[in-house]
Amino acid sequence: MLQDEYAAFLSGRDWLVQGRGVFGVWGGLPFQVNFAPSGRGAAAFLFRLEGRPDRAGLKALGKGLPRGWTLTVPRAGCYHLVCNGAKLRSARADFSAVLDQTVRALRELGLTVPDRCPLCSRPGCDALAAGGGLGEGYLPVHRACVEGRNRTVQERAAHNEASGSYITGFLGALLGGIVGTLPTVLIILFAQRIYALLFALIPICAYYGYQLLGGRMDRGAFVCTLVSSVFNLFSIHFLTNYISLCQALGRAVSLWTGLGMYADTVASGSITGNLIQSGLFLLLGLWFSWRVITRTGRQQAHQAAAAADTLRPLDGVVLTRAE
């Protein structure tokens, strides 16, 4: 949808609008709808439900939707009802009927709204909220949990800005990165294999090591994580060579001896090919972990506050009370 059509679609509806996300309740089921206002546009309604629906029933529901509407289940418990922009422009009037049809069918398939708070995993939810680490969708929560988490994150962010240290943070990033290399080292030694996906553990562990030792959570967190990841790229090769050397000699050798032999190996260029391959795997690992390692304290505080801003009563929502 174009931006003016997007605004017209939302006008007069008792829904919560936050950026391009919209939150509401339809037929007793809370939903989140995301709009793509550029190009042809689209509206994607997301329902987070629990239960094991009959596959044939879901397939029949999808086939029974009007042209321009589709139902997908990208992950267990996530039901996406998507209307393309052209359909939304030409037939705004029938979207209510489609939502009624979909909600009724989802209920008939035995799908229900859960009653366990994503923050504490306990039942007795008394509000709805979205975003800020709660998970995808508009979810039942305890208001006290969301508000308490928001206060904690804000206080932690303020304290970190005042007392965070790049020095201790970088030390934590180095140690965390070493921990992140251990699965790769063990796989190389015992299985004689290397898995690119495991390289994502290096920056992730470095990032959390930085955070654990009180690093200042601004852009410096990413810089220290990146430096640690590159450093620990060499740690993988050093550790595998050092352990292999000890196994070959049948005894432990000093780390200084191992470092000297490793430096000679690097200088000779005999492992350049392995380093290049590992560097490419590390780039892939950085890409996989990008959303984690680029988070700053201010971003986390903003996300927690945004989740608190979406808090609304459970009016009209039919919950499955957990036992």
Image (tube, helix red, strand yellow):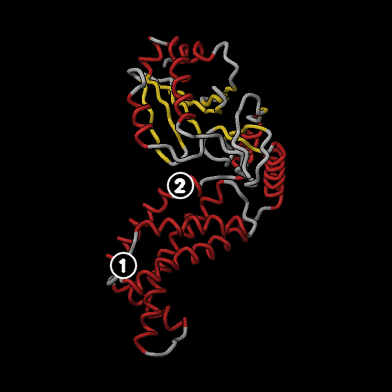
Mark nearer the N terminus (2 vs 1): 1
Q: Which residue is mark 1?
A: 193
To which residue does mark 2 refer? Answer: 290
The amino acid type of the residue labelled 1 equals Arg
In percent of width and height, residue 323 lies at: 63, 45
Residue shown at 35% from the left, 22% from the top: 64
Residue 98, percent from left and from top: 43, 18
Residue 21 is marked as none
**Which of 61/75 is in front?**
61
- Residue nearer the viewer, 246 or 1: 1
- Examine the rendered structure and indicate whether residue 90 appears above or below residue 163: above
**Element assignment for label 2:** helix
Viewer-side residue, 304 vs 173: 304
The residue at the point 46 percent across, 36 percent down is 78
| Visible residue check, residue 1 | yes
The residue closer to the viewer here, 314 or 216, is 314
